[in-house]
Image (spheres, rainbow, N blue to C red):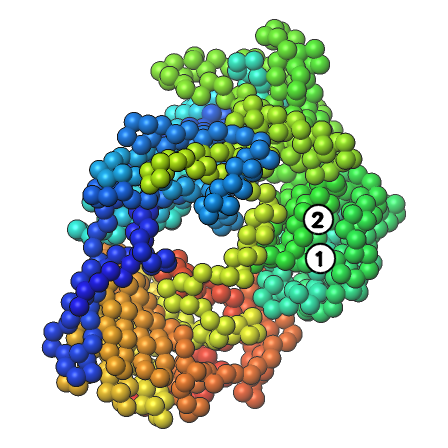
Amino acid sequence: MSGLLGVRQLLLWGIACLWLPSLARGALVVSGDHAAVQGTRGADRSLQKRSTNDGTVEVYSVTVDCTVASRFAHTVMTSKALNKASSSQEIFFEVELPKTAFITNFSMEIDGQEYVGEVKEKEKAKKQYEKAVSSGQTAGLVKVSGRKMEKFSVSVNIAAESNVTFILTYEELLQRKLGQYEILTRVKPKQPVQEFQIVTNIYEPQGISYVDAQATFLSNELLPLVEKTVTDKKAHISFSPTMDQQRKCPGCDETLIDGDFIIKYDVNRAKSLGDIQIVNGYFVHFFAPPDLPRVPKNVVFVIDRSTSMRGTKIQQTREAMLAIIKDLDEDDYFALIQFDSIIDPWKESLTKATKENVAEAMAHIGKLSARGATNINDAVLRGVNMLVKDRQENKLPEGSIDMIILLTDGMPNTGESNVPRIQENVRSAIGGNMSLFCLGFGNDVDYSFLDVMSKQNKGLARRIYEASDATLQLQGFYEEVSSPLLLDVDLRYPDNAVDFVTTNHFSQLFNGTEIVVAGRLMDNDLDNFLVEVFAQGFEEDFQVQGQASAVEWDVIYPEEEYVFGDFTERLWAYLTIQQLLEKSKIGTPDEKANATAKALDMSLQYSFVTPLTSMVVTKPDTEDGTDSPLIADKLTEDQRLQADRVAHRFVSPPLYSYAARPTYFVDGDPHFMIELPDRDDALCFNINDKPGTIFNLVKDPTSGILVNGQIIGDKKIPLDGKINTYFWRFGITHQKLGVRLEVSTQDILVFQDGKRVKLLWSDTASLKGANVDLLVTKDRSLTITLRDSVKFVILLHKVWKKHPYHRDYLGFYTVDSHLLSPSVHGLLGQFYSGIEYEVTDLRTGDVPEKPDATMYVKGQQLNVTRGWQRDFRRDVKNGENVPCWFIHSNGTGLIDGDVSDYIVSGLFKRV
């Protein structure tokens, strides 16, 4: 029996990929002959093992070349492929780039013929786009890819035995956050590539203080391949593994390289004036003076507790606020306002952040619960009035900064609900005297409403993604704005020396950030180029001045043939366009139109793909001899939000689909988890016992299903003396079907009707029988489907063979148990029929980020702790954090009886 199951072959690289579509949409492998497994009879005769064949497109070169000159990054990605087939093939090129970057060029070279993209006004490009769509073509090239990235993709028909080269160029100004700059490259090769190279050169005349290069996929073998050379003003980082070094195992076609390659660095900051560079008629001024004392802040937290916040969002908000309040400096003043249709302040004025007041506030936050509608207008105005009143009554320190942080997940739907009127009410009430920061939680928020309102009031907006790390996102944002250093920063340059200066007045400078100003010189006479900076510090005014001088790049870097010589002009253009785009959202209609027109002109002049322009790529179509245009756009944050809404509602199913039913699993050391999606909640507990112990996980006397698991310990006791145990072997039987499986970290044994089939984790294989279906995904997972009863997934966690302590281990997941009988039991099975519980009295625990609470379950009152465990189904390597209520002492009070009641004497023995 043979046939093509087929399929698309993905030939992925670095942040880019090439792929070849075939007959069926959605599959990701090419399958060849299906060889029957020997030694099977009767019902087992249909058991078959599948194998895969190599594709006919060879990606033989992938390079990512990034040059950073004074924070301005210029990145070129190049990929080369050969169609080795005897007929033409359609090849897709995909690349992920930071959402803050502007594409500046794209070209394809096919057998010596070059096709170059052209930046046009979006409205003009739209006509070509609509023509392509009406002819049945997919014309859009740019899609959302996660929180930080955008995916650019294009396809082209390549003739037999022909070569194609794809080149994409983009630029961005690196932003300093939390004291460092970050260059992120997403690498997902999916297969070894003959020439694979990431090279980054950083040029900083100001001097480099440190450089760090990391990757989420770096093993002990790959780590030495990251070469880093750092001198005073230059850093060179490269990563270029050979094909064999890229392989997961000798001779196989899977690669170790899969994740993010991240470079972080900062520069020296010896002068309080900052660093001023003048190159080729343009200047750029970087201002982040060292060693400034923080300015105390007065912050009002305005927290949405409406019905839409129920479940995980309100829990994550509680957890984040507990950590944020605990982190307040004792010189700070703060207030808490919870709101739904009712505005509910904790106290009527701001409170000094003493230890006693912080503890009282944390207890108050612990009672936060969701209910009611959403009255944003009155909630924010209450916060404004509180700050104004306390200022008038001299309750707040002189020289401190006033700010409001609003967290909401939806639209205003009670009280004043007209968005423009809310914005005007808030702007009028604030009157330029405080900053408003808006956090939009989830996919249903009106982000543009929050974005405009924050920018009108000296603040900024940030999306908080609805995910397991939302707590960390909230804390991360607060950390960025929690330490103001200067207020009302004014950077001045001689009027007769410069023009077209970017924004040079800033409401505040926060610790770990940087102010950047750029402009054009009116002449090259620098004798009178005096720079002055005025600002308000905590205890005194900040004032500094100095003379700027031109930077001689050929002197600083005499051996570099610098190919990015106009970087100051392009940095100025990039910054100007970004600021014009921001101005186009606020102000009068005339001001908006003027800012939009200027941003469009500059985008076209400097060939930047911005929200106002598009890159038109005319690709050859070798089948009918005609050219067909494709359009690359720049996504706005509203477009990204809309895409996330669509993706949230229509999620592509993973290898095994996440249904809206509970999931029960054990993974790690060993961590048991009961996920309850109908409650947006989860319960978790650990089981600790000596290595070699066998536990019963599932037993159903009605169907005859039994699942037992044996734990194993570390190779030796670690230095901290803690012995970790994991499941390494499972025994699964179905008496009525006559099926028995023994699954270990080494292999998978299937027994039926006296016959034995052995599968290896090192193969991708499928076994189909009348009573059982097995699917092995190489070195990753085993999916077990037992006829008319249950579906399990076992994950393989591979550990570095030379690890001094740890071993390979397994995770066990029940993904469908609805056909089992009500009498099912076991450490996991007892929860298959559901569990009722109630959690109350949230309070501060031993760790502030992990509050305690009281749980009522099975007639008992338990002390539980809010924590996280990892679900590895989507990401076997890193897992996904899932918030859960942790039940202490081996799950005592949650599980029936004692943990010793579940110990059995053999892998297939019953209790």
Q: Position of residue 109 (x, y in %)?
A: 33, 30
Q: What element carries label 1?
A: loop
- Image position of 674 (left or right of 52): right
Q: Where residue 402 sits in the image (x, y, percent)? A: 75, 44
Q: In which quarter of the image is residue 782?
A: bottom left
Q: Is residue 321 above or below residue 212?
A: below
| Marks 1,2: beta carbons within 8 A | yes
Mark 2, Cα crowd under 10 Å, few <14 / some 14-19 / many 20+, is some
Please indicate whether residue 632 sits to the left or right of residue 8 in the image.
Answer: right
**Residue type highlighted by circle 1:** Met
In percent of the image, x 73 and y 56: which residue is there? 302
Q: What is the crowding at mark 1: few (fewer than 14 residues within 10 Å), some, or many (at least 20)?
A: some
As drawn, the label of residue 449 is 2
Q: Image check: 668 left or right of 888? A: left
Q: Nearer the viewer, residue 99 or 318?
A: 99
> What is the quadrant of residue 338 in the picture?
bottom right
At which x and y percent is residue 729? 26, 74
Residue plotted at (14% across, 85% down): 754
What residue is pinned by disc 1?
Answer: 411
Q: Is residue 309 above or below residue 597?
A: below
Q: Which of marks 1 and 2 is nearer the N terminus?
A: 1
Residue 441: name its quadrant. bottom right
Mark 2 lies on a secondary structure that is helix
The front one of 110 and 48 is 110
Q: Is residue 397 above or below residue 466?
A: above
Amino acid at pointer 2: Phe
Q: Is residue 669 visible?
A: no
- Let me know if residue 191 appears in the view: yes
